[in-house]
Image: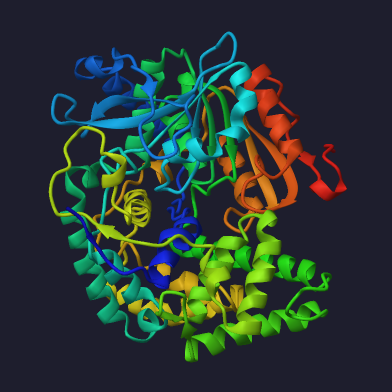
Amino acid sequence: MQAKLETRPSVRRCAVGGALGLALLGAGLPATNATTTATATATATATATERDAGPGMSRFYDQKVKWSACEGTDMPKDLQCGKVTVPLDYARPEGRTLDVALARYRATGDSRGSVLLNFGGPGGSGVSELAVGGKEFMHLTNGYDVVTFDPRGVGRSSPVSCGPATLKIMEATDGDGGLTDPEDVLKRLRDAAAECAKYSGPVLPHIGTVDAARDMEVMRRALGDDRLNYLGFSYGTRLGAVYAARFPDKVGRMVLDGVDTLTEPLTEQGLAGARGQQTALENFLDWCVEDIACPFGVDARDARDQVERLVASLDSDPVPSAFGEPFTGQDMVGAIGQALYSRELWPSLERALAQLLDDGDTRGLEGFSSGGVTFPVRGDRGAGLTDEEDVPMDNLPAALMAINCADDPDRPTAAQVTASLGRLRARYEEASPVFGRYRLTQVLMCYGRPKGTDYIRADVKDLDTARMLLVGTRGDPATPYRWTTETADRLGPSAVVLDNRGEGHTGYASSECVHRKVDDFLLYGSLPPDGSSCGPESAGTGSD
């Protein structure tokens, strides 16, 4: 039995806008001696390989996936589902286990194996994404079984939840509360973190990208592939990079699209996100004022001023939402941020903003976010797969916070947070007059949680792997292009960069040129030259 709470705009902002906008909370890289770094990396890799090949792991590596028709609402008839069993705690493989949900479209002809997909998040269900958006990947079935999964803690794979604390977290960080009374907010976040642990069960201490990467090695073996062929988007690029660091000799054809940072601390990532969203907003407004239906007139600079004034007006005097709750300027900011992830959504965003300005109608903007939070009854959901209808509705934001915090070793004290907040606020508002405040309150989310791993910060670099394709999009509001080149430099000579000179988050779905080059690499091993580019779709799809 599940208790359902009322849908609220702030919750929807957490569940979707926050989930995408906070997909990249990472860690900083300390300076080290180059010789010491190389030795430490080699030692860590050897130790990881020995441990992963230990006798306690054989029962996991020897399993095979049993595929059957997927059960659930609106599942495509040709989509098959399965599972692999993995250790709950890789330090104790003889102990408790959990099941990881898989889905696949079979190769249409002779299969050369599998290509594994991760759609990002973190916290997004791969099984659900493939069921809805599988047509984008059908060309890959010319040579591969196209496979995806729900990472541990996500979807049907022992989903985490924060229970009623989901609303408490959003209420604590909504608006200016975190900026005017940080001590109270930090206390509330610490209490909420304890509730998240209570509602999530035994998987929570073992969630995060390092364990998910080790799960992928179990998947590779269960699928019968000699090497891992992989296509990861946004957060999925972090996951792919961690896998490559841990299992360098098992990397096949790997593509990372919308490349995450491996080095920047959480506060710097929030700033990068604010700048990226501000740039995307300005690009949208430049487009909007050229259209006769634009509600902001014909001058782009005046349009930007109007948006800023509208946000401030709604924060001081909210209008009723379709659900009867106040719709604030920050609700509007969250909805706009969601719409800016794809250029295809710009006409819909233009209409939604016109509805708000002309009639006070918030439904168009609210449509960019999904609603509803369902809280599960406290209890251990067990090691098996969770039924679709029993996945908590707050699983996406709960998993996003849990995974990002598990990957982040930094935990500033309350005194450090309080002392730095004023300076950070000025930097964030300078980075984006529209998105700055919204992004700043979200950098507090890990407060009160256990310290995360430093593996990504310390060991994911200087890789000796097969060559990997990294795709960066110039107008990406979430993963700035410089992260692609910085990550490529960090990974080493194996990384090949494709420069997508377009708009939106990631390139595979929005650029025919990127789509073609990625498919050519995955299917035929045809890798574009390092530094080659794809032009904007409006200017053609050729490369430089």
Q: Is residue 122 above or below residue 174?
A: above
Q: Name the outermost residue toward the top.
A: 110
Work out which quarter of the rendered image holds the C terminus and state it. top right
Count of marks overlaid on the render: 0
Residue drawn at (30%, 37%), measured in percent from left and top? 157
Horizontal side of 238 relative to 539 (left or right) equals left
The quarter holding residue 197 reads bottom left
> In the rendering, at what x and y percent does residue 77 appear?
47, 27
Q: Is residue 376 left or right of residue 442?
A: left
Inspect this view and state whether residue 214 appears: no
Residue at horizontal 65 percent and vertical 80 percent from the top:
307
Q: Residue at x 41, y 42 (%)?
A: 125
Color scheme of the displayed model: rainbow
Does residue 334 sit above or below 148 in this rendering? Answer: below
Name the one closer to the observer, 53 or 73: 73
- The location of residue 104, given as percent across then percent down, is 46, 25
Seen from the viewer's position, the closer of residues 56 and 86 is 86
Residue 155 coordinates in the image, percent (x, y): 34, 43
Q: Is residue 148 visible?
A: yes
Percent from the top left, x then y, of residue 122? 42, 48
